Image: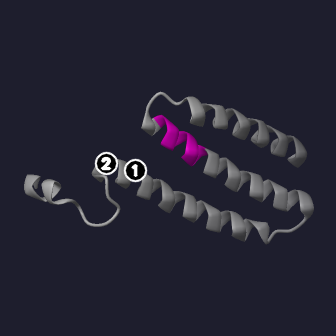
Amino acid sequence: MFLTAAIALFVSMALLLVRLYAGPIVYDRVLAANLFGTLTVLFIAVLGFLTGRPDFLDIALLYALINFVGTIAILKFFRYRALGDIPQIERGRK
């Protein structure tokens, strides 16, 4: 059962790479990258169950946190064109 889930996740990840490459706009590509990270977390968890190593769940949780922070950073970069403070142009609008 876990082997079938691992194969399905792997196929989904391969299809997501196609979507990541052919996304018509930037936000489609960011969404595909985020979903690829989520499927990677699931794949690591299933792999941990297949090999009998439950400590892979800790690695999967850490990867999920990194995926979340990375997605937020990428979206902030595309919106403000900077990762630091809000640019001066945006401050004047508030």
Is 11 in front, or is 86? Answer: 86
The x, y position of residue 79, in whole percent, is 31, 48
Q: Of the residues shown, which amino acid type is indicated by label 2?
A: Arg
Tell which of 43 and 54 is nearer to you. Answer: 43
Whether pointer 2 and pointer 1 mark residues with C-beta atoms closer than 8 Å, the reply is yes
Residue stretch in magenta: 28-35
Q: How many callouts does the rendering have?
A: 2
Is the stretch drawn in magenta largely helix, strand or loop?
Answer: helix
Between 5 and 83, the one nearer to me in the picture: 83
Q: Quadrant of residue 12?
A: top right
Q: Pointer 2: what residue?
A: 79
Relative placement, left or right, of 69 versus 5 is left
Residue at x-position 59% and y-position 34%: 21
- Residue under circle 1? 75
Q: Residues within 10 Å of mark 1 (few under 14, many from 20)?
A: some
**Residue at 55%, 48% in the rendered image:** 34
Quarter of the image that includes the C terminus: bottom left
Q: State the image coordinates of residue 4 (x, y, percent, origin top left).
A: 87, 41
Q: Which quadrant of the rendered structure holds the N terminus?
A: top right
Residue sitting at x 56%, y 64%:
65
**21 lies left or right of 3:** left
Residue 31 lies, in percent from the top left, at 51, 41
